Amino acid sequence: MSVKQVEMVLAPREPHYVGDGFRVHNYIPSGYGLTMQRMDPFIMLDYASKFHFPPSPYKPKGVGVHPHRGFETVTIAYKGSVAHHDSGGGGGVIEEGDVQWMTAASGVLHKEYHSESFSQTGGDFQMVQLWVNLPAKHKMNNPSYQAIQNNLMPKIQVEGGLIEVIAGEFNGHEGAASTFSPVHLMNAKLNKGGKASLSFPAHYNTALIVIEGEVKVNGTEEVPLDHFVLMANDGEDFSITASVDSVVLVLSGEPLKEPIAAHGPFVMNTREEIMQAFQDYELGKFGVLED
């Protein structure tokens, strides 16, 4: 047994707004050293900590039409609900506990905003949006969309709680999401005193976010609410113990180890490919979507 140690515990940075509907703390990439290369294949992570939005009955808050190419966007709903539409025909509403997994690949336009029902009532809103890089050989695949309802996620009992598998696997149980490289994404939902033992290959980049409550990692490292934990690439096994009732997002993925060229909404392998993405977008090759 080789223990995966905690490399750093990070407090949330000052929030900023994406559009007018997503108040987020950025963790990847950030000034903490969490570069796209360090966190490969996870190239962006915005965390919308719990925040109360008043009703907005006339115009749902959110982000208007914008393009993406070269990666996947994964949105996990913890509080509130989000609507999504894209030029590839994907779309729908994710409610609390659901996930939307959009593969932008060769290029797509999309928009995301508070659902109509949430806009009418307002309430607590809490989300994670994660960008997962695509291997070079898949960057120009056709776009696709996976709507992953909570009831489709395997839920595996652990000591004093459960593991909810979105992607990858836990104890032989496969998550509902289809991925292009080895990616594990799961929620550890633990009652006070509950414990989850996890294991990922040492070279996988692994991190945690405390969505609810407070936990100890490996029995000693205290991690408060909304904090981010970067695990070192020095071992395989680690544990999460809940100091109070807690929810922890766990992500771990095998690095692609390919060149990363990123500019705004496009993530490719070369500067030339980025320039081509902008040209294709200007030429309308990403389809049509009304704002």
Image: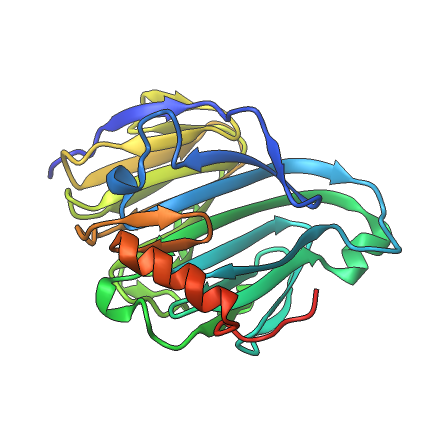
Tell me residue 116's x, y (percent): 79, 61
Q: Quarter of the image containing the C terminus?
A: bottom right
Name the side, left or right, on which 91 lies relative to 214: right
Residue drawn at x 31%, y 66% is 139
- Which residue is at a point 29% across and 49% down the rendered structure image? 261
Q: Quick check: 276 left or right of 61?
A: left
Looking at the image, can residue 58 be seen? yes
User: In the depicted view, which residue is nearer to us: 203 or 281?
Assistant: 281
Percent of width and height locating residue 221: 34, 22
Most extreme residue toward the right is 58
Above or below residue 45? Residue 242 is: above
Give the left or right position of residue 180, taking residue 225 as reference.
left
Residue that appears at 36% across and 54% down: 267
Which residue shows up at 60% across the image and 72% down it? Answer: 91
Q: What is the quadrant of the N terminus in the image?
A: top left
Residue 133 appearing in the image: no
How many marks the image carries: the answer is 0
Measuring from the top left, give residue 260's x and y in whole percent.
Answer: 26, 49
267 vs 2, nearest the viewer: 267
Q: Toward which corner of the image does residue 33 lie, by quadrant?
A: top left
* Above or below: residue 201 compared with residue 179: above
Quarter of image, res 230: top left
